[in-house]
Image (cartoon, grey):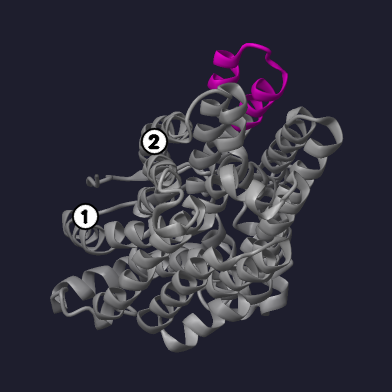
Amino acid sequence: MFRVLKHNEDSETGEAMNTSTEEVAVSRKVYARLVWFLVLMFICSYLDRINMSFAALSMNRDLGLTATSFGIAGSVFYLAYVVAEIPSNLAMQRLGARLWIPRIMITWGLASAACMFATGPSSLYVFRALVGLAEAGFMPGVLLYLTYWFPEAYRARASTLFIMAQPITILFGSSLSGALLEMNGFMGLAGWRWLFLIEGVPSIALGIVAFFYLDNRPSDAKWLSDEEKVILRRTLERDEERLAKLSGHTTLEKRSLGSQIFSAPVVLLALCYFGLVMSLNTNSTWVPQIVHGLIPHASLFHVGLIAAIPSLVAIVAMTYWGAHSDRRGERAWHVVIPMCVAALGWLGVALLGTPSLRFVGLILSSCGTFAAQAIFWTLAPRYLSESARPVGIAAINVVGMIGTAAAPAIVGVLHDLTGGFRAGLGFVAISAVAGAACIVAIRFSRHRVSYSDAAEHLAR
């Protein structure tokens, strides 16, 4: 996974990113200890987030949900998530990941399982809002947590594996959710109620384990030797010094929080993420119903299996793309290209008439969306000081979550108005292209404008 990179040039900054054998060894040890566990946690998180899309295959009928009301239920989750996002990240910074991340997991597991008690649209909205409030801060909190442990040269692969939890969850969650729906009538409960109950329990259990497993910082890790802690601290400090050097005489730490959050690169990153999560949310919310429309006579279990195929391909694509980004030391175009691929995929689903070709479009949209998201989160630390990252990363994610809150309702309303997914998916494709254009703007602006503030110098 990791190897020594001698004088590997970061094409975003033009700076050399040298690594030693000792640094590689420590990074491998940290990777083996943390990343797979974080992936498992994110799988539970994402499973509790997307199970609504599978529950809808029978829940919508039982609760009398239209496409619009189902979309609103998704939007309510993300609106609640947005409200609690920045406070949650600040709480993690204050209380530490070892306490705060387990709290998030246990409470969202309880809230997700409680969705089994929904009796109609209104009660479903309440339960999904509680899930959003409980889960807020998990993903940006973990992405911030990764910056405490991984140097820049390895961060794309670490964040790629973490983000890979999403397609992994869709991959096995599709078949699992389809099987749970087949439990319809067991002990007098509808299949979708069993789905919420059974898929909420692992988050609670893993949250308890996380309290004993995670460490707040490398200095707290008993599984690292004193020498390994020194090597890792020195490597991380070198990264910060490199960023400070690029900022000229004014370091990021000397700039106010507001000036960093509202600098041009950070604002453009937030707008990019808005477009990216429109695609991400559509993938997680509507794909089962799109697949069901392509094969209307298939069983719910088979719909789940087929809906998992795009995610399987995306896992392979993400693995290659994250490693390729680290080897090249390039980030921006590794976000732009897959976002454009995702847009092309959604247009294919919307406009092509043959089911097999539309399914290829789903595969392209899945690969592009997840590959872009994994690399995207390596960009933010370049434009934010260490003290500003908890708020900055959360703020970028909040803007994205606003898009995520809007996406289910927009696609749902357009579906009800037009009788199909064509208009909604066209809107998603345009959003993805607009997001890619924001990254291009960051890259293009460095050739046109002489920046004076530190964050803008980092775009050079």
SS state under label 1 = helix
Up-down: is 424 above or below 241? Answer: above
Residue at the image position 34 percent from the left and 64 percent from the top = 202
Type of amino acid at the residue the image marks with label 2: His
Up-down: is 250 above or below 364? Answer: below
Q: Which mark is residue 415?
A: none
In the displayed orientation, state which residue is furthest to the right: 417
Residue 245: image location, x then y, percent: 51, 64
62 vs 135, nearest the viewer: 62
Q: Which mark is residue 24?
A: 1
Q: What main secondary structure does the magenta stretch of the protein show?
A: helix
Up-down: is 345 above or below 398? Answer: above
Residue 329 shown left or right of residue 5 in the figure: right
Which residue is disc 2 drawn over?
A: 324
Type of amino acid at the residue the image marks with label 1: Val
Residue at the image position 71 percent from the left and 24 percent from the top = 350
**Is residue 454 among the parts visible in the rendering?**
no
Task: Name the N-terminal-most of marks 1 and 2.
Answer: 1
The magenta-colored residue range is 342-360
333 vs 174, nearest the viewer: 174
Q: Is residue 358 magenta?
A: yes
Residue 398: image location, x then y, percent: 66, 65
| Cα distance between the residues tagged 1 and 2 | 17 Å
In the displayed orientation, state which residue is furthest to the front: 188
451 vs 323, nearest the viewer: 323
Up-down: is 292 above or below 381? Answer: above
Residue 219 shown left or right of residue 240 in the figure: left
Residue at the image position 49 percent from the left and 33 percent from the top = 367
Q: In which quarter of the image is residue 57?
A: top right
Residue 69: image location, x then y, percent: 75, 53
